[in-house]
Amino acid sequence: MATQAEPYSAPRRNAAGGCLYLVATPIGNLEDITLRALRVLKEVDLIACEDTRRTAKLLNHYGIHKREKSYHQHNEMVRAAELVLEMEQGAQVALVSDAGLPGVSDPGQHLVSLAIRHGIPVVPVPGPTAFSAALSASGLVTDNFHFVGFLPATRTQRRKALKPLVETAGTLIFYEAPHRITASLADLAALLGDRPAVLAREVTKVHEEFLRGRLPQLAATVKKRTLKGEITVLVGPPDELTRKQPRKREVSIRRLVERVQKQKKLDLKGALKQVARKLGLSRSEAYRRLQEEKVLEE
């Protein structure tokens, strides 16, 4: 049941008056920012930005002129301490990322934790996030979802991270970089099977695009294209079609090598050579897959 919005009241600050605001910024369209976010950005003493150049475009668009400091993954350990010191001395600080809500797959968690430990109030100023916008328009299950964020960059670690998600109920949501999207979709199809899926690209921007289909189909489609921009991948839970189609399992290099070693009394190198020849693989590829299986089974 909807309730009437409460009138604005200033958050309780620490003794010196310091406060940390987590301000959500547009994920593309500059009009997607709340009135509260604009007011906070105008009133704070300092804006900590993931990229000062990106944030400057937003601030200039709305005529906001404030002192800025960079706060990103490469300097957050040092910069967080500096910002907390300023807040302990009474500064009101707004933290923004390049797009969306700070701390959600963007820098911010360390500063929030440090501020809390020092008794500094942390105030969220909500707004757009790419995964919620993509989920709402996906057509997939929305009442039960699991946000994963970015998967590891390497194939072995990516598959290891996906393995525990196979039995997860609800829609799975991932962020991915354009240069890794083809490999990631192939791994998603291999590990999760033939599920309904959606790729949302450049949400709220001029070239916004939604690609929908079964996961293997989506992987094949993307393989033929060169995608750019911000990408969110959503994978639905298994449906009736998924359950009726048994997943194709990759041949286990490890088991084949162990069988050849046992049957022909060969060392690892000799057995791997025979298995590679049998599967039509180079020895280096067979060795890579062997090492990958060992990591996945740990």
Image (cartoon, grey):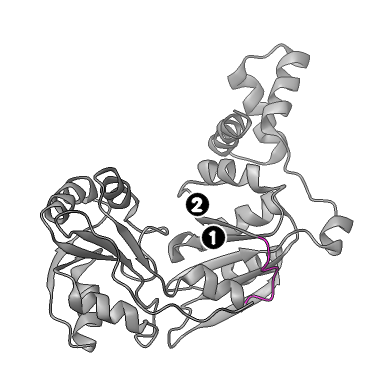
- The residue sitting at 67% across, 61% down in the picture is 144
Q: Are marks 2 and 1 in contact (CB under 8 Å)?
A: yes
Q: Residues within 10 Å of mark 1 (few under 14, many from 20)?
A: some
Q: Is residue 249 visible?
A: yes
Front in this rendered view, residue 101 or 289: 101
Q: Amino acid at mark 2?
A: Leu
| Label 2 to label 1: alpha-carbon separation | 7 Å
Checking the image for residue 174, the label placed there is 1
Where residue 296 appears, x then y in whole percent? 60, 35
Q: Which residues are magenta?
A: 138-144
Front in this rendered view, residue 265 or 186: 186
Task: State left or right for residue 207 relative to residue 54.
Answer: right
Quarter that holds the C terminus: top right
Task: State left or right for residue 152 relative to residue 96.
Answer: right
Front in this rendered view, residue 214 or 258: 214
Q: Secondary structure at mark 1?
A: strand
Where residue 12 appears, x then y in whole percent? 28, 61
